[in-house]
Image (cartoon, helix red, strand yellow):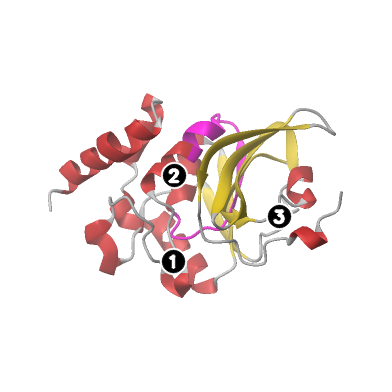
Amino acid sequence: MNIEQARFNMIEQQIRPWEVLDQEILNLLSLIKRENFVPAAYRNIAFADLEIPLPGGERMLSPKVEARVLQELAIYKGETVLEIGAGSGYMAALLAHRGRSVTTVEISPELAEFAKQNLAANGVSNAHVVHGDGARGLADGAPYDVICVSGGMPVMPQELLEQLKVGGRIAAFVGTAPVMKAQIITRVDEKQFRVSDVFETLVAPLQNAVHPSLFRF
């Protein structure tokens, strides 16, 4: 397999047609080597339009979904980022190149270690992996400029909203099967939030995601 040709095809045939037109994002996808974050057994499909299996039954988001979320978050260089669900560490690496620092929380000890090793091996020094349950965010370090949730949630928990700075953004997959909405939620002021539906998709649910019956209005 010609890796660079496969990477080029991924960007031009999958990602650009998905309305990812920010050239800085497209350049970043060439810079951060996705194949280095994929389990060795699946490296030959690192650029395929699918969710690649990870240890513990988890999956990487498809390349076009990762890229679109990254574009919609519009992260600035000085911003602090919280990611819920480290997975392989690939999304954290992308986020880290856009922001000042990334804290990524992973509930699976095996995946937390996998992400930590991948980030270190690829020279990403401003992303920190925390082993823990991030379904309600991470109060230590809040408030954040950006929160990126890399798994599905039936509802958006109040705790996550409260951990966002005014002007900050959350990217999340909200809803249940068969369709979830990828949303960008912006904190307008102390009490108001603006919700933008970006696209529809279906991703694996976040472990211990808040159930609607527990939601506080």
Q: Work out how far the residue at label 1 is from the one at label 2, CA to CA, in angstroms.
A: 21 Å
Residue drawn at x 78%, y 51% is 159
**Is 168 situated above or below 202?**
above
Q: Name the residue under label 1.
A: 114
> In x, y percent, where is residue 116?
47, 61
**Is 155 situated above or below 19?**
below
Within-10-Å neighbours for mark 1: few <14, some 14–19, many 20+:
many
> In x, y percent, where is residue 125?
47, 48
> In x, y percent, where is residue 64?
39, 42
Q: Which amino acid does label 3 sit on?
A: Leu
- Mark sitting earlier along the chain (2/3): 2
**Which numbered disc covers residue 138?**
3
Residue 206: image quadrant is bottom right
**Which numbered disc covers residue 181?**
none
Residue drawn at x 44%, y 62% is 59
Q: Is 78 on the left-hand or right-hand side of 110?
A: right
Toward the left, the furthest residue is: 1
Within-10-Å neighbours for mark 3: few <14, some 14–19, many 20+:
many
Q: Which amino acid does label 2 sit on?
A: Val
| Magenta span of residues | 69-89
Within-10-Å neighbours for mark 2: few <14, some 14–19, many 20+:
many
Pick the front one: 179 or 156: 179
**Is 113 situated above or below 37?**
below
In magenta segment, residue 61? no
Residue drawn at x 79%, y 44% is 162
- Mark sitting earlier along the chain (1/2): 2
Q: Work out how far the residue at label 3 is from the one at label 1, CA to CA, in angstroms.
A: 20 Å
